Image: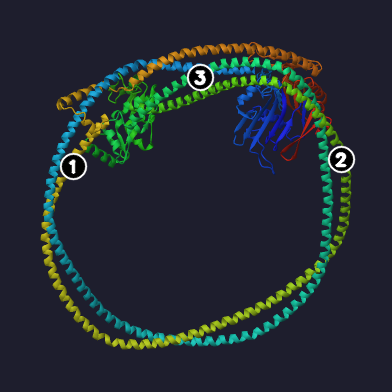
């Protein structure tokens, strides 16, 4: 068996797919530091199942995926395939070639494959177990890890020796057996626990079952009586309901008669009110008209006075306007003079601007002349630069051609090396083909031997299959037991949750209120707190009846709830309004709190919403919880604070000194324990579900293994058929081998001819490269001459540029002068426009003032004419006012008569209203009785459903015709008393007792089977211990002898030995290394120098390889700490292991010289490794040593 090749894609620095072919002998991998050489050994270790990122020189496993560079994107996956030649059959698999593949994605998902078939990591480890090539063995020595062999703790060195001894498979089987043994012991403990639990319960369950049977018989008789009593009560209530309805109809008739009388009085009252309203309207209009007349008289009088004042104001306004018109005339004359002055200045400005424009034209002509000459220089320089660019391009082109020829030359050289390699391979293949011919003749005998081996292996698999099937049956039994237990506890949980939801254990009043949905009801006291386990009995005893108190939001909510209880006669309750309750808590002094057995005040031991702090202080603020009655008595004697003491078992010592205690014969779980039991059952169900899932997974693994064994048997049969086919094909292989030999000779001749052609082309390439370089140098010389000419022209060009800048400055100044005179002309024009506008505005104002003066004089004339006619109008209005006062007096008299009649009608209405209210009250009271009677009927029907789960219609079918009400009530009362004396019963105990009895028998039988399995496992482990101990000691002695020999050979003398720290316990003993180099005293390995440690570690590694040769070995710079002399010893000693294939990652020239194949790792692109390969004889070691 040996490594054939390694395929990598996206692993660490190998971004592109890389294939490394391994050959027999020594393969060296070289390259600069940081080029990625050690990534190859990491890839092999990773493909074989390494799980530690640290061992792969990383922080997390995803770092093995190529992470990208500045020019490359990161890969999404890393994949490594290790192809192993298994023609010797060392690996326990039917294939001659085995490809082990591992993939990892950036999501963290991993895949393992064997020959492209998905598998588990466990499958790969089992495949390579005890072959020496595992990641924990001695076949892969990572970078800097050679010294760890001797530097590790003694107990850590065992891994190498165990791998060499071939006991890893035994240890794995032992670990599996120990795991099974532990599981079997755990199963036995669980069965013992369950059996013990059942034995403790089965007696009580039997008693509870008998009690439940008696209870159910009495309950059924009580149910029959109560149903018939309730039916009779419903019939009586129905009769009362008919009577109430008849009385309500008579009262409704009285209401109709009184209503008709009331409607007649209402109609007359409405007519009188309408007439009164009409008179009010007439009176209001008459009053409004009189008010308007008075206002008009006052208006005319006031207006006459106002007109006199307006005439005086108009005279004053006329004088003001005359003055303003004179001022405007003066301002108009002044603006006219300013306009004439600006027109005169406009001509002067235009003459100066014309002179500045002529000066600008002269300077522009001068500037154009100078720039024309400068442009001529620029054109000459540009032409020269273009020529330089062309020559540069020509030189670059020649150099590029030379480089292309050199590249092609490299390709030809590479092809020549490939041909040489191919010829060597053909020679090797020819020798191999000759071997195949001989092997074909031996194939028949090997096939028959293999056929017998397969038959024996098949028999072993059948025995293993039977054992697994027995274990499958055992696991199915355990899983079924867990499923039964889980189902029972789920049923118990549903029962308790239903009791919790239905308020079982609470009185009828609590149930009624909690179902009513009254606003403000927050909950029952027992629901609003959390009590730690162990304190339930103490807290519930301390609360007593207060457990059934109800917490409400406020007093109004309490009133509504009490009203509902009264109306429905559902009982009495205590309500605790959140905002009204004022609790009081006691802080016990040190004489109590410091005594042994004191647990704390009741309010401090529970948890509740802080909104209910006052309520729970009111309920439990004076209650102290203690361990037992003795502690309670001792504390109560020394207490003067009014504290009630309650023990964990429920005894109470009141403040008066009275002691309450005892226990019912069959006391069931109280209300608080019921809440905790719900939580406990939920946790148990979760635990059992998880355990059941684990058993199902374990069962599935066994089923998978059974299927694998069945498949193995099928594969064995298939292989036997293949052996028969192999015999038939041996002749064909011989003929094929001869044909392959002829083909190889023909290909070698073709390669010889091609190699001659390549050598001729290499000579031509050298001539072309020389000519291209000569032409490139000539172009560079011409570039230098033209460059000097450009420098001279550039200096002249710079001088001309100064004259251009002076001319440009003169033009700029001339343009500034022109712009200045243009601004002055523009400003003068704007002033002319502004003055012209002001002048037009003043003329417009003067005209408007003259028009206002004319209108004012006209208004003054009109006011004088109107003043004279107002006196005549005042006399007419006074006469109208007197007539309106007389009309108002007549209306007032008629309204007084209507008011007297309305008073009489109102008295009649009040009498009718009183009669209606009286009859209505009687009807309301009768309806309340009717509603209460109907509610009682509904409650009795609800009782039938709630207590007996039967509808009213179904109950009527159970009516007894010979039913005697009085005797039945008496018998029902006696049955209720007897049921109460029986107390709480567990009806489920009947079925539970039957189940537990069956389960007890099942578990007893199962325990016997588990004890038998336990003894068998202990026997197997003892056998494995003996085998492991003997095998390890035998191989350890061999390694020690080989270590002494190799050490002497490498060191040229000296002494070395291996010692067990505890020879009495070779299975767990650490291993010490003691060495004595020549000329030194015997000493512990840790006291030696670095080079001596490395050589000692190499000696130990070689000793292990001599004891148990591994098919291949990967060594990563193991000789880095050695000098040249010791490197020669190390490299030379490798040749002794002809059966082992070595891959060395090295920097040392001496090591390279012993290599059969050399691979180079480079990094032409930053962060990306590249592979180069060649055979020895095609390279110079000096080129690769760095």
Category of crowding for the residue at label 2, using alpha-carbon neighbours closer than 10 angstroms: few (below 14), some (14–19), many (at least 20): some
345 over 785 or under it: above or below: below
Secondary element under disc 2, as helix, strand or loop, is helix
Which residue position holds label 1? 928
The image position of residue 750, as x and y in percent, is 83, 34
- Disc nearest the viewer among 3 and 1: 3
Secondary element under disc 1, as helix, strand or loop, is helix
Give the Cα distance between marks 3 and 1: 74 Å
Along the line of sight, the residue nearer the viewer: 668 or 491: 491
Residue drawn at x 22%, y 25% is 222
Question: Residue 129 occupies which quadrant of the picture?
Answer: top right
Give the Cα distance between marks 1 and 2: 125 Å
Which residue position holds label 3? 472
Which residue position holds label 2? 762
The quarter of the image holding the C terminus is top right
The quarter of the image holding the N terminus is top right
């Amino acid at each position: 068996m040996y490594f054939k090749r390694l395929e990598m894609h996206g692993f660490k620095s190998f971004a592109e797919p890389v294939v490394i072919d391994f050959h027999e002998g020594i393969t060296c991998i070289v390259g600069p530091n940081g080029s990625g050489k050690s990534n190859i050994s990491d890839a092999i270790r990773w493909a074989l199942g390494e799980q530690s990122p640290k061992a792969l020189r990383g922080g997390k496993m995803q770092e093995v995926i190529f992470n990208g560079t500045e020019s490359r994107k990161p890969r999404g996956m890393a994949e490594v395939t290790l192809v192993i030649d298994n023609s010797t059959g060392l690996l326990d698999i039917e294939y001659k070639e085995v490809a082990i593949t591992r993939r990892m994605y950036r999501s963290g998902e991993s895949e393992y494959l064997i020959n492209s078939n998905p598998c588990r990591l466990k499958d790969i480890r089992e495949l390579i177990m005890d072959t020496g090539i595992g990641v924990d063995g001695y076949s892969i020595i990572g970078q800097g890890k050679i010294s760890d062999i001797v530097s590790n703790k003694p107990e850590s060195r065992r891994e190498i020796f165990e791998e060499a001894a071939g006991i890893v498979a035994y240890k794995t089987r032992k670990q599996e057996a120990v795991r099974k043994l532990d599981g079997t012991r755990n199963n036995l403990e669980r069965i013992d626990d369950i059996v013990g639990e059942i034995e403790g319960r089965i007696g009580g369950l039997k008693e509870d079952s008998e009690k439940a049977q008696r209870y159910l018989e009495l309950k059924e008789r009580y149910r029959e009586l109560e149903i018939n009593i309730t039916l009779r009560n419903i019939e009586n209530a129905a009769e009362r309901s008919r009577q109430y309805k008849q009385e309500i109809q008579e009262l409704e008739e009285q209401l109709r008669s009184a209503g008709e009388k009331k409607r007649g009085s209402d109609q007359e009252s409405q007519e009188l009110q309408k007439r009164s309203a009409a008179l009010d309207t007439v009176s209001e209009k008459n009053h409004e008209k009189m008010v308007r007349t008075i206002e008009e008289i006052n208006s005319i009088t006031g207006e006459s006075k106002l007109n006199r004042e307006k005439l005086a104001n108009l005279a004053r306004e006329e004088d003001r306007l005359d003055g303003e018109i004179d001022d405007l005339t003066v301002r108009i004359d002044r603006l006219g003079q300013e306009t004439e002055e600006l027109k005169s200045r406009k001509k002067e400005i235009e003459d100066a601007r014309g002179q500045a424009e002529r000066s600008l034209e002269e300077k522009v002509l001068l500037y154009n002349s100078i720039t024309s000459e400068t442009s001529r220089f620029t054109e000459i320089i540009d032409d020269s630069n273009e020529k330089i660019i062309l020559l540069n391009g020509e030189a670059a082109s020649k150099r590029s051609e030379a480089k292309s020829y050199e590249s092609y030359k490299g390709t030809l050289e590479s092809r020549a090396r490939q041909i040489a390699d191919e010829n060597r391979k053909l020679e090797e293949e020819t020798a191999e083909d000759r071997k195949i011919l001989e092997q074909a003749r031996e194939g028949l005998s090997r096939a028959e031997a293999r056929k017998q081996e397969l038959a024996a292996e098949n028999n072993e698999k059948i025995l293993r299959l039977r054992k697994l099937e027995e274990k499958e049956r055992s696991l199915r039994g355990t899983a079924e037991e867990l499923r039964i237990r889980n189902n029972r506890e789920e049923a118990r949980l549903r029962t308790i949750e239903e009791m919790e939801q239905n308020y079982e254990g609470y009185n009828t009043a609590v149930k009624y209120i909690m179902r009513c949905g009254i606003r403000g009801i927050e909950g029952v006291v027992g629901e609003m707190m959390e009590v730690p386990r162990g304190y339930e009995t103490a807290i519930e005893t301390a609360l007593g009846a207060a457990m059934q108190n109800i917490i409400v939001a406020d007093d109004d909510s309490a009133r509504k709830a009490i009203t509902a209880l009264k109306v429905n006669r559902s009982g009495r309750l205590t309500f605790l309004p959140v905002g009204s309750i004022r609790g009081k808590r006691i802080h016990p002094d040190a004489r109590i709190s410091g005594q042994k057995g004191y647990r704390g005040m009741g309010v401090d031991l529970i948890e509740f919403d802080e909104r209910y702090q006052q309520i729970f202080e009111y309920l439990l603020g004076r209650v102290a919880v203690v361990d037992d009655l003795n502690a309670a008595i001792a504390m109560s004697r020394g207490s003067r604070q009014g504290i009630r003491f309650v023990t964990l078992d429920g005894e109470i010592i009141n403040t008066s000194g009275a002691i309450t205690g005892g226990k019912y014969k069959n006391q069931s779980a109280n209300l608080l324990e019921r809440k905790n039991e719900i939580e406990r059952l939920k946790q148990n169900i979760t635990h059992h579900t998880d355990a059941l899932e684990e058993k199902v997974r374990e069962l599935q693994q066994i089923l998978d293994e059974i299927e694998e064994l069945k498949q193995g048997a099928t594969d064995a049969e298939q292989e036997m058929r293949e052996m028969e086919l192999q015999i038939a094909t041996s002749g064909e292989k011989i003929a094929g081998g001869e044909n392959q030999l002829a083909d190889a000779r023909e290909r070698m001749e073709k390669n010889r001819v091609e190699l001659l052609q390549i050598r001729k082309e290499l000579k031509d390439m050298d001539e072309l490269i020389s000519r291209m370089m000569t032409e490139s140098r000539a172009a560079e010389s011409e570039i230098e001459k033209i460059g000097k000419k450009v420098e001279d022209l550039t200096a002249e060009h710079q001088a001309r540029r100064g004259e251009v800048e002076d001319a440009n400055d003169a033009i700029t100044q001339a343009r500034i002068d022109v712009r200045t005179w243009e601004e002055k002309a523009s400003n003068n024009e704007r002033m002319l426009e502004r003055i012209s506008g002001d002048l037009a505005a003043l003329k417009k104002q003067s005209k408007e003032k003259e028009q206002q003066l004319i209108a004012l004089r006209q208004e003054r004339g009109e006011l004088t004419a109107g003043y004279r006619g107002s006196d005549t109008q005042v006399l007419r209005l006074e006469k109208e006012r007197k007539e309106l006062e007389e009309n108002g007096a007549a209306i007032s008299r008629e309204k007084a008569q209507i008011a007297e009649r309305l008073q009489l009608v109102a008295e009649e209405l009040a009498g009718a209203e009183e009669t209606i209210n009286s009859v209505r009250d009687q009807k309301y009271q009768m309806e309340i009785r009717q509603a209460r009677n109907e509610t009682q009927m509904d409650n009795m029907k609800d009782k039938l459903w709630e207590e007996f789960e039967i509808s009213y219609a179904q109950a009527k079918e159970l009516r007894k015709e010979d039913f005697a009400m009085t005797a039945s009530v008496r018998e029902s009362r006696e049955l209720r008393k007897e049921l109460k004396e029986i107390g709480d019963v567990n009806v489920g105990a009947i079925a539970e007792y039957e189940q537990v009895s069956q389960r007890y028998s099942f578990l007893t039988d199962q325990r016997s089977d588990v004890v038998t399995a336990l003894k068998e496992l202990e026997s197997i482990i003892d056998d494995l211990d003996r085998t492991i101990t003997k095998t390890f000691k035998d191989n350890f002695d061999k390694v020690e002898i080989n270590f002494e020999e190799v050490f002497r050979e490498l060191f040229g003398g000296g002494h070395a030995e291996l010692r067990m720290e505890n020879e009495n316990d070779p299975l767990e003993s650490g291993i010490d290394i003691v060495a004595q180099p020549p000329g030194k005293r015997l000493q512990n390995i840790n006291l030696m120098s670095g080079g001596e440690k490395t050589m000692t570690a190499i000696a130990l590694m070689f000793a292990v390889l001599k004891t148990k040769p591994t098919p291949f070995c990967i060594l990563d710079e193991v000789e880095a700490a050695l000098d040249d002399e010791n490197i020669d010893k190390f490299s030379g000693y490798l040749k002794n292991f002809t059966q082992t294939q070595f891959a060395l990652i090295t920097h040392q020239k001496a090591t390279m010289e012993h290599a059969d194949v050399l691979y180079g790792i480079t990094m032409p692109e930053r962060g990306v490794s590249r592979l180069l390969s060649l055979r020895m004889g095609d390279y110079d070691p000096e080129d690769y040593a760095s």
